């Protein structure tokens, strides 16, 4: 039985490289040689032992790209051996109200590859063929892991109507916030501000040509009042997921403005419900993405400066160091792993 190296979440606050068996394919599966995999904020929650659904041992990772090396199926498929792919990691039940009505990405019992079954932080992974999305031949596999987080942003923006003249504020300059701002700028939004408390991430934002504000130094509500002569923003994308942004978001938009909640708050935040009433605000929830969002993200990716947010690349052997760096809140944005290309199956 051939072996591979994989990053195993083995117990809370412990992730390590182990040698494990390369999984076997069942009918309808493909074996993928993983090329590159990213760390998501949810992966930090998993490894810290704080994710309510995840139990060790588990190979984590849901943002990854790779190449199909074998297929176990006699049926015609949209992919074939040798294709470079990204993975649509959502596992829906197919039975609940959401699934029956065409929005299975908000399935009542939604599960995710890398959370509820082994993920892509390994040299190889076996997945059903219908979870694979083929990349164009010219696509750069090194940025393949960014398609999943980019799809989150594409989906959030598609949840609302955007006009070029809109004033928009993005709260949070982590990878999702920066990617959201990138897409908005690509769509012609020029009156765009992004906020954070990390000078390091705000520096990346400025490098991307964004108007970046440090909320440790600037009262963002007062700033927007001054900048808009009191009109405030048309849309706020809440991506920071911290109590202060939940309190501020209703103040930042004008009457009948829109707030898009993208982040998943660790605890229930305090929100000014009276402000929602008095200003007749629209609050839009946004959760993950659809397959169409993935396809749009793939089409858009070559036109965006995605590499600018990738601050660190590690070999798979560096997984413990990478997670420790992020747990220590060291200067970093998007962290990727580039793998040795397996054992040549």
Image (spheres, grey):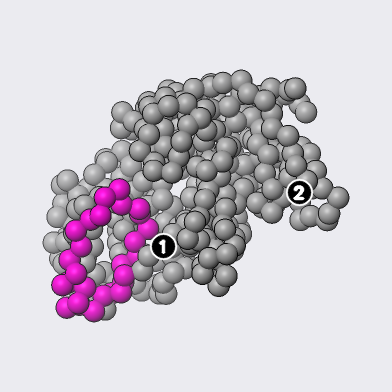
Residue at 13% across, 61% down? 222
User: Compared to 176, does 258 lie above or below?
Assistant: below
Answer with left or right where residue 127 lies relative to residue 147.
right
Question: Depth check: 16 or 316 in front?
Answer: 16
Q: Quadrant of residue 274?
A: bottom left
The image position of residue 13, as x and y in percent, is 38, 27
Looking at the rendered image, the quarter that the C terminus falls into is top right
Q: Is residue 261 magenta?
A: yes
**Residue 167 visible from this viewpoint:** no
Residue at 57% across, 58% down? 93
Q: Is residue 144 magenta?
A: no
Residue at 30% across, 32% down? 329
Q: Which residue is mark 1?
A: 286
Q: Which residue is mark 2?
A: 28
The image position of residue 287, as x and y in percent, is 44, 59
Please tell me how crowded label 2 is: few (under 14), some (14-19), or many (20+) other residues with Cα within 10 Å.
some
Query: Going from the N terminus, do you reach mark 1 or mark 2 first?
Result: 2
Label 2 element class: loop
Answer with left or right where residue 340 lies relative to residue 161.
right
The image position of residue 152, as x and y in percent, is 47, 56
Label 1 element class: loop
Q: Quadrant of residue 193?
A: bottom left
Answer with left or right where residue 318 lies relative to residue 169.
right
Q: CA distance from mark 1 to mark 2?
A: 31 Å
Answer with left or right where residue 256 lies relative to residue 320.
left
Residue at 72% across, 50% down? 129
Stretch in magenta: 257-283
Question: Depth check: 46 or 55 in front?
Answer: 55
């Amino acid at each position: 039985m051939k072996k591979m190296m994989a990053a195993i979440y083995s117990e809370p606050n412990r992730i390590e490289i182990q040698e494990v068996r390369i999984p076997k394919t069942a009918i309808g599966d493909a074996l993928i040689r993983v090329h590159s995999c990213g760390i998501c904020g949810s992966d930090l929650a998993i490894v810290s032992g704080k994710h309510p659904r995840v139990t060790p041992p588990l190979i984590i990772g849901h943002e990854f790209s790779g190449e199909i090396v074998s297929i176990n199926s006699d049926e015609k498929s949209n992919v074939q051996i040798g294709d470079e792919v990204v993975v649509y990691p959502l596992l829906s039940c197919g039975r609940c109200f959401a699934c029956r009505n065409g929005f299975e990405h908000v399935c009542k019992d939604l599960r995710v590859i890398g959370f509820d079954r082994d993920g892509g932080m390994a040299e190889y992974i076996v997945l059903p063929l219908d979870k694979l999305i083929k990349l164009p031949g010219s696509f750069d596999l090194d940025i393949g892991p960014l398609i999943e987080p980019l799809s989150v942003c594409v989906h959030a923006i598609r949840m609302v109507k955007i006009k070029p003249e809109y004033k928009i504020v993005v709260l949070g300059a982590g990878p999702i916030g920066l990617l959201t701002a990138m897409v908005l700028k690509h769509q012609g939004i020029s009156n765009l501000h992004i906020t954070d408390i990390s000078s390091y991430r705000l520096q990346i934002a400025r490098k991307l040509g964004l108007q970046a504000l440090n909320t440790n130094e600037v009262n963002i509500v007062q700033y927007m009042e001054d900048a808009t002569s009191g009109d405030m923003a048309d849309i706020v994308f809440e991506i920071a997921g911290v109590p202060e942004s939940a309190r501020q978001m209703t103040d930042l938009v004008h009457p009948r403005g829109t707030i898009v909640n993208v982040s998943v708050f660790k605890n229930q935040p305090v929100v000014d419900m009276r402000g929602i009433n008095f200003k007749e605000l629209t609050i839009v929830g946004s959760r993950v993405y659809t397959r169409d969002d993935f396809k749009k993200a793939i089409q858009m990716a070559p036109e965006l400066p995605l590499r600018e947010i990738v601050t660190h690349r590690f070999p798979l052997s560096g997984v413990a160091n990478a997670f420790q760096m992020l747990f220590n809140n060291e200067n970093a944005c998007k962290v990727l792993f580039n793998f040795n290309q397996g054992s040549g199956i």
